Amino acid sequence: MVESASISQLYERLKAMEWHALFHMFYLEPVVFVLIFSHVLSGTVMRNQIIYQTCTVSFQYNVSDCEQLDDKNAGPNIHAIETEIQSYVAEMFLSRTLIESIIPAVCGLFIGSWSDKYGRKPLLVISMIGFAGSALITTIICALSGNYAINPWWYTLAALPHSLLGGMCVFSVAGMCFLSDITDIKTRPYRMVFLELLVFIGLSSGTFLSSYVYAATNAAITQGISASCLIAATIFIIIWMPESLHIRLAEDAKAEAEQAAGQCEDATIEKPAKTTTNDLNLDQSKKQTEPEPEPAVGLFSTTHLKDMFKTCLEPREYNAREIIWLVTLAMFMTIFVVDGVMTVMYLYVRQQFHWSVREFTFFETISQLVSMLGALIGFLLLRKVFGLSVVTLALLSLCSDVFSNLIRGFATLPWHMYLSIVFGVFRSIGGPMCSTIVSNIVPASDLGKIFSIKNVMQSFAPFVAAPLYTLIYQHSLAVCPGLFNFLNALLYLIAFIAIGCVLRFKLKHKQHYAKILK
């Protein structure tokens, strides 16, 4: 009886949930899924293709030897070739990372304030055109390499279109602002977690299908599929996605009008208002002194720069400014690790465990599936059943990252890498929880500027992360290739301490943050 009552109660709760509000303006999530899926579908394949072309074109080894580079049963001479080529390829990956970061970092200084005035959709369209253009150029280069000896450095130059048009920095700022515009404090955490789940579905499905598509076709066709997906997503945004900024502004204006009307009604009930000549003169003087609409300014106007820094540095009540910067620091540390690991992880597993493309993509698929399961358990079970706050869940995520990377640092056998996945089960809930913290304590009119400064810091991260991780990997390649994992653990520990300080401020102002950071 008790079990049936609890099931019926759960059914009634799900039935009463406002699903139309939860999935209102469901436009961004499919685009994010396609973007992530297309990147990972061809990412590992193209890294493998670059290694192969470096071996045959740049170093001019025999094709038969270069085809055995990912064979764990190959002889010592093949492993020596692999070690020699990896140092060169690491520099190539580093150069591409820097190209993808320079201009987006500069754009990030202006786009936040610009989007708060002129909208989110133009930035989404521009950034997606860049992604589609780079993918199309890479497809053409890869197709030509089947008949001609093309230097692999051309793949690095293919990153210019999406770099010049803002890259992931512009897309993420506009995307997070779009999501914040169409949600409220109640529905925002659900949409953040759901977006994160779609990201991991895109990652897991892309990595799982990558090796099979590559085995059934070739690198050029795999890259062509990715380019087609990005072109379709760009067309979807242009034709169907609406602008979200005016929706948010209209809702805010409506809420302010209702609040003002309620205050006027209360004032009328308490004491009837009497209109005097002085009141009329005062109203006329107010109308005359009302500020005129601000003139339109360009994207790279210094006005946007001033607005961004003013918004991010201005004092706020209840240590809100400190919380914003501490969360930004934690997210910066996370993206710093991601940018650094992205440069060397595939090289590391090839060197340490001699994994093939299929073995690496299988590992990545399992990693994403476990992370997705951790996000579901972490948010639905720990938050809904045990009532853990968004700050506590962020701490749990970072703690999970610390232990996961320590295990990877000590890994000597392939199963150790899978053990690190188990310890990192909650790592995926950190990003949504940190974004929720910021969006809940910042007004909608300032969200673009706040997310902009966060993404600027994240865009500058590769300038340090990529060279640092490449340097560490090159110098530890012969002794301890996984040394960079210990640096990961240290940076995640710093992020854990930063969120711990946020928890302290929350407890200090417990009454104010009871609902905001629930």
Image (cartoon, rainbow, N blue to C red):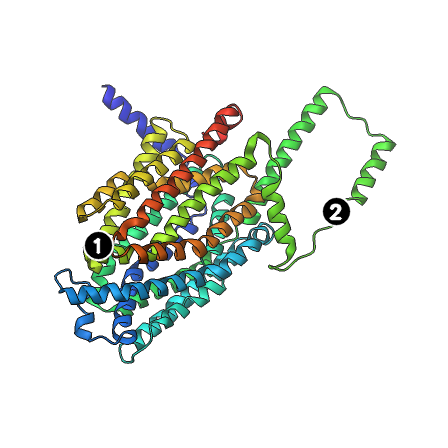
What's the amino acid at mark 1?
A: Gln
Q: Kindly identify the residue that appears in the image at 32 percent across and 65 percent down.
A: 89
Give the crowd class for mark 2: few <14, some 14-19, many >=20 residues within 10 Å. few
Q: Is residue 56 above or below residue 434?
A: below
Q: Kindly identify the residue that appears in the image at 33 percent across and 59 percent down.
A: 38
Q: Quadrant of residue 344?
A: bottom left
Q: Position of residue 68 (x, y in %)?
A: 17, 67
Of the two numbered discs 2 and 1 in the rendering, the one whose residue sits closer to the viewer? 1
Q: Nearer the viewer, residue 7 or 179?
A: 179
Q: Position of residue 393 (x, y in %)?
A: 38, 34
What's the amino acid at mark 2?
A: Pro
Q: CA separation, marks 2 and 1?
A: 65 Å
Q: Quadrant of residue 21?
A: top left
Residue at the extreme right: 277
From the image, tell me which residue sits under label 2.
291
Q: Nearer the viewer, residue 407 or 161?
A: 407
Left or right placement of residue 131 versus residue 445 in this view: left
Left or right placement of residue 27 versus residue 212 in this view: right
Q: Earlier in the sequence, mark 2 or mark 1?
A: 2
On-image quarter of the N terminus: top left
From the image, tell me which residue sits under label 1.
352
Q: Position of residue 249 (x, y in %)?
A: 59, 44
* Residue 458 can be seen in this image: yes
